[in-house]
Amino acid sequence: MKPLIQDTPGLAALYDFFKKFPAVSGRNMLRFISAFATKNPSEIQALISILQDMKEKLKTCPECFAFTELELCAVCADPTKNHQKVCVVASWIDFLSIRSSLGSFSGVFHILGGLISPLEGIESKNLTIDSFVRRIEVSNVQDVIFAFSPTPEGEVTCSYILNLLKQKNLFERIKFFRIATGLPVGMNLEFADRSTINQAFSEMREI
Ligand SMILES: [Zn+2]
């Protein structure tokens, strides 16, 4: 598509910028570019202000790594949550999906920032696994639920973390669970609907 807008360098630059974003490609990318091209200068200025403001205020929760503008995210700061039950998820999107699907989930979360994927060059050191293990070590967490997509990356990440926790003898005081059965093999949790996520949690199994 880019060669077709090559004679308009401003739009081509916008194309190159959006190309780095996940889930924006092909015709959708052109719709996006077209929408930007027709905005008036004050709307573009408003967008720049929103982005700058977001970047200035946004940080990650030191407990669970969710995005927040406060010291702790809304879940970690909630005293009515069961802080002894931690649901480990790959991404912030999975964190939101589970929160919206399981309104009744009483625990807190830990966001890894991805899954181990040798093919994509994502190693454990690129994720928040060390922080998770430290968090478990120094807290009185009793239940850990791994809510990963049933993909090879999900399996590898789960095994890797379990091995680390075994080495630290944390299996004696903590119960580990895995959701999976409700999700078709290979399905990304991000795209699962509410009933699928509910089923996956209701059929969780102890490891
Ligand atoms: Zn948090």
Image: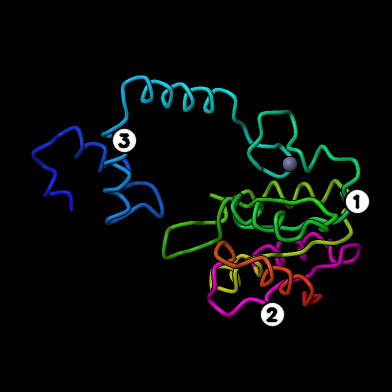
Q: Residues within 10 Å of mark 1 (few under 14, many from 20)?
A: few
Q: Residue at x 57, y 55 (%)?
A: 124
| Mark number displayed over residue 181 | 2
Q: Residue at x 59, y 24 (%)?
A: 57
Q: Which residue is mark 1?
A: 140
The amino acid sitting under disc 1 is Asn
User: Label 1 CB, ligand 1: below 8 Å?
Assistant: no
CA distance for labels 1 and 3: 50 Å
The stretch in magenta equals 160-188
In contact (CB < 8 Å): disc 1 and disc 2:
no
Dot 3, how many residues are within 10 Å of its Cα: few (below 14), some (14-19), or many (20+)? some
Badge 1 element: loop
The amino acid pointed to by label 3 is Phe
Q: How far from the left and from the top, in percent, is residue 71?
A: 74, 29
Q: Are marks 2 and 3 in contact (CB under 8 Å)?
A: no
Q: Residue at x 17, y 49 (%)?
A: 2
Residue 16 picture location, percent across and down: 25, 42
175 is within the stretch colored magenta: yes
Disc 3 designates what residue? 36
